[in-house]
Image (cartoon, coloured by chain):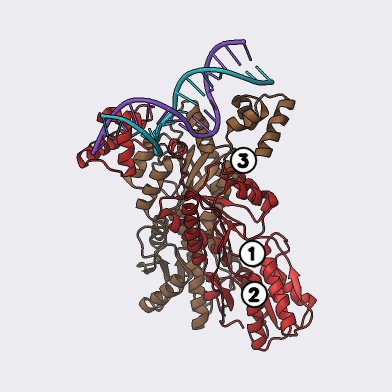
Chain colours: A red, B brown, C cyan, D purple
Amino acid sequence: MSEFMPTMADVAREAGVSKMTVSRVLADRDVSVAMRERVLAVIEQLGYVPDASAGTLSSGRSPFIVALVPSMSSSNFADTVHSLNAAVTAHGLQLLLGDTDYDLKQEEQLLRVMLAHRPEGVMLTGSYHTAATRAMLKRSKVPVVETWDVPRTPIQQAVGFSNVDAACEMMRHLHERGYRRIGFIGGATKLDRRGLDRQMGYREGLRLFGLGEPRVIEHGGSPVTMSHGGEAFSLLLDAWPDTDAVMCVSDMSAFGALMECHRRGIPVPRQMAVAGFGDFEVSRYCFPSISTVAVDPHAIGRIAGEMLLAGAVARKSGLDGLSEKRRVEFQVIVREST
Amino acid sequence: MSEFMPTMADVAREAGVSKMTVSRVLADRDVSVAMRERVLAVIEQLGYVPDASAGTLSSGRSPFIVALVPSMSSSNFADTVHSLNAAVTAHGLQLLLGDTDYDLKQEEQLLRVMLAHRPEGVMLTGSYHTAATRAMLKRSKVPVVETWDVPRTPIQQAVGFSNVDAACEMMRHLHERGYRRIGFIGGATKLDRRGLDRQMGYREGLRLFGLGEPRVIEHGGSPVTMSHGGEAFSLLLDAWPDTDAVMCVSDMSAFGALMECHRRGIPVPRQMAVAGFGDFEVSRYCFPSISTVAVDPHAIGRIAGEMLLAGAVARKSGLDGLSEKRRVEFQVIVREST
DNA sequence: TTGAAAGCGCTACCAT
DNA sequence: ATGGTAGCGCTTTCAA
């Protein structure tokens, strides 16, 4: 087998046509049926694969949409990415995916590398970014959508919900159920702004319903894990033994807390209520099932895709910076644990 | 603000040097300190971002490693990808990630698109692929590594373990514990070959230890979910009420089965043992904790990265097709559920 | 250490 | 419906 990698010129020569005809066949433009078949046969026979960088350079059109998430292991973000992917793939684009590990500085560096591919759009997670990140995005004129949060002043477009409000709704539910000594467990890291917003919602709920001083345990890094939840719950009980409900920053930690209750023989919800956030699979199927705040990660991904596509069209028409905010619903799902 | 996107030529002119000097500064080649600083200042001031497609086209070197996984939502694959990413990022490469949805035909189509970027390497999941996939890979001469399985005849390199053997080891454990009427629950789809291999291991275990006829429930699609597990477990009890242990194709379904036991008041493991596969977080922290087969997804990703990097070097030296198989350890982890 | 020229493989544009 | 030419922005190669 030859070491040789065929180019469009090879296909053209072999088929006895011009490069342009080959290019048109691949782009599905106007070519006669006979011609198309002849060219396709040669492509097949040679095993020709077009070179994307040449195409991009020549046309000025990139096939990429950049998507930056804090973690791919989180099913929420994985779901958002999956739907975003479906949305953009339908338009012939592909995802260039990056994993920031909950680190804004790393988000900035990743973005710098990825902008070199001149993407048609950029999806970011959250509304907190470095100044350099914002500057790069502004300068590049690329369509941008921030997700999972709705900032007061988005870079451009945004789709998400208020984590503060959502957490506060869960507090309303707990209060209505009669719980009065409610604790909160979340991560120790300042990097997870959505987690901090949820804690703010908890505090707002305390004030709103007159539930006294905060009982907050910050423990563990990002992403929040089940074991963090169990440990944090133990710390919470040490600090405030009379706690009658615990609100968790995520279903993962809620599950950890719930299992710790099992181990200690604490009946849930009779003696201790447990609330989660995110509607992860585990909270629906565990026993007792965990009350949680449900959002639709797929909707976020799908809408982000639509916004980016619209932004790409707008940019081509010379229009500047769409600026739309869209909110997705969140909903307190009451299950057995509260 | 201008609509204009600066090129290397702009930087060069502004700095009063040639394009080559700018290129060298960016590549960190030999340039005098004074010159470097002058150029970097202009780059900063202009907000210049190099164009990756031009660079790729000109140098013939792509910055991409392609990674194709059945699903990003599975934490096992997410972990593998994470480690692969760490390994290749250290060498200045970036991942082009694809999600096949457990569909070999989609794997083929994704690969076709991604080969257009002339990647330096390709990571595949599993050892089953379409003929066209194999042909493309062979022709492109790109370094390839198959993961999560160790095929008899890999396309090139492979890193993984035998799912058959691993499942059989779990059967040995169950047999030693005294269980004799063991069922198996897995997915209904033929697409998950690793799942089928695990079922084969179950059947081999039955024969090896003289445990009678198979009790197999195939239920639900890919990826396997917790709810599939609960439903399949119910079907298993309907079909073979005297079952005393259930081996599950994944920790997800094992957890579903375990929760179904809770609901039915079946004590675990006294009346029913539950075994999983994959050592997911949930199996370690649930109650009772679930015995499982642990593999190291991070090791698979890291080794895959090393193999690909080695393959890229070999290719540059004109060498052809490295062919190495590496096995990672698996281990039966005994917990409370068996 | 720096520069000039050529060319990577493709598509836009204008002809025919 | 098809072809020819120019050029995208960079790196390679060779020269100074």
Tell me the residue at 42%/54% (across/down): A89
**Tally of numbered tags:** 3
Could you say whether the residue bearing mark 1 is in a helix, strand or loop? loop
Residue at image mark 3: B90
Tell me the chain of label 2. Answer: A
Question: How far is the residue under mark 2 from the one under mark 1?
Answer: 13 Å
Above or below for A139 versus B37:
below
Above or below for A90 versus A42:
below
Above or below for B91 versus B218:
above
> Image check: A47 left or right of A269?
left
User: Counting residues from the N terminus, which is met first, the one under dot 2 or under dot 1?
Assistant: 1
Closer to the eye: label 2 or 1: 1
Q: Is residue B226 visible?
A: yes
Residue A103 x, y percent position in the rendering: 67, 54
Residue A11 x, y percent position in the rendering: 31, 31
Quadrant where the image shows the C terminus of chain A: bottom right
Tell me the amino acid under the disc marked 3. Ala
Residue at image mark 2: A165
Q: Which mark is residue A151?
A: 1
